[in-house]
Image: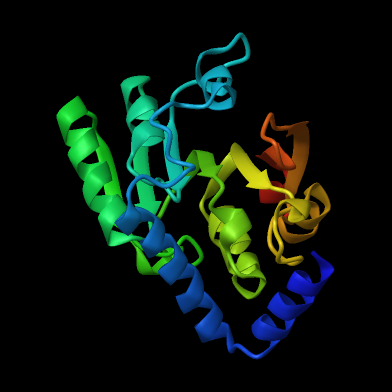
Amino acid sequence: MEDARAALRREREGRTDLDWEEAVRGELEDYYRAGKPPWDTDVTPPELVALVEGPDALPPGRALELGCGTGTNATYLARHGWEVVAVDLIDRAVRQAREKVDAAGAAVQVLCGDATRLDELDVPGPYDLFFDLSCYCGIPPHRRDAYAAGLTRRAAPGARLLMFGYGPEAFDDPISGVTADELRARFAGWETVEVTPGTNEVPTFWFTLRRDSDAFGRR
């Protein structure tokens, strides 16, 4: 394992940032070209259901899904009264998502674009909910501050971010994955409300962050 990690680290060190971004895109395209990616189960996770339908459910508002895949969760949110915009990097995923939301009669705007470059898309916000099912943990580290900044600029006071991510231990690549400490460092003006371990065979977590309402009064 250590030999594999060392080799991968040397390979990454030889890449430019653009090389790295293209490699991530290529890996995602390969998953969709081969069939359904392992993270796209057609089942809305209970953590999102609890946030939308549970005893402390959020009132329906505006939602932005990052890395929407084939649109399962965007469709779910729209069916429960949310105004939804969904973004994915991969053309094939976006086409499938548009077909799914159309078949369901769901009012979802599905856009093809980069979750770290939201200024290039028609997603001005503000949003009350951001949902990320393993999008952030696959983003190269040099683009993660841009992801956090993009969400922060579009967050309504008290907005929630519900994120599922793999821990770094889940990968042979030691700099992939995500931790609570990293999110606290990158998401200035947000409070980490909850961190819950996932039920996967490898380390995974559900992170819930809330935009600090007081931050708006200090501008």
Frontmost residue, 171 versus 116: 171
Frontmost residue, 134 versus 128: 134
Q: Is residue 132 above or below residue 34?
A: above
| Residue that appears at 50% across and 20% down | 59
Counting from the top left corner in percent of width and height, residue 121 is at 35, 63
Counting from the top left corner in percent of width and height, residue 184 is at 79, 52
Q: Is residue 3 above or below residue 161?
A: below
Quarter in which the C terminus is drawn: bottom right
| Residue that appears at 59% across and 25% down | 47
Determine whether, in the image, residue 107 is placed left or right of residue 71: left
Residue 105 visible in the displayed image = no
| Residue that appears at 42% across and 36% down | 62
Quarter in which the N terminus is drawn: bottom right
Determine whether, in the image, residue 121 is placed left or right of residue 66: left
Q: Say which quarter of the image contains residue 199.
A: top right
Q: Is residue 169 above or below residue 200?
A: below
Counting from the top left corner in percent of width and height, residue 18 is at 51, 84
Q: Say which quarter of the image contains residue 174.
A: bottom right
Frontmost residue, 174 versus 123: 174
| Residue that appears at 77% across and 40% down | 192
Counting from the top left corner in percent of width and height, residue 211 is at 67, 43
Frontmost residue, 134 versus 124: 134
Determine whether, in the image, residue 55 is placed left or right of residue 18: right
Residue 180 visible in the displayed image = yes
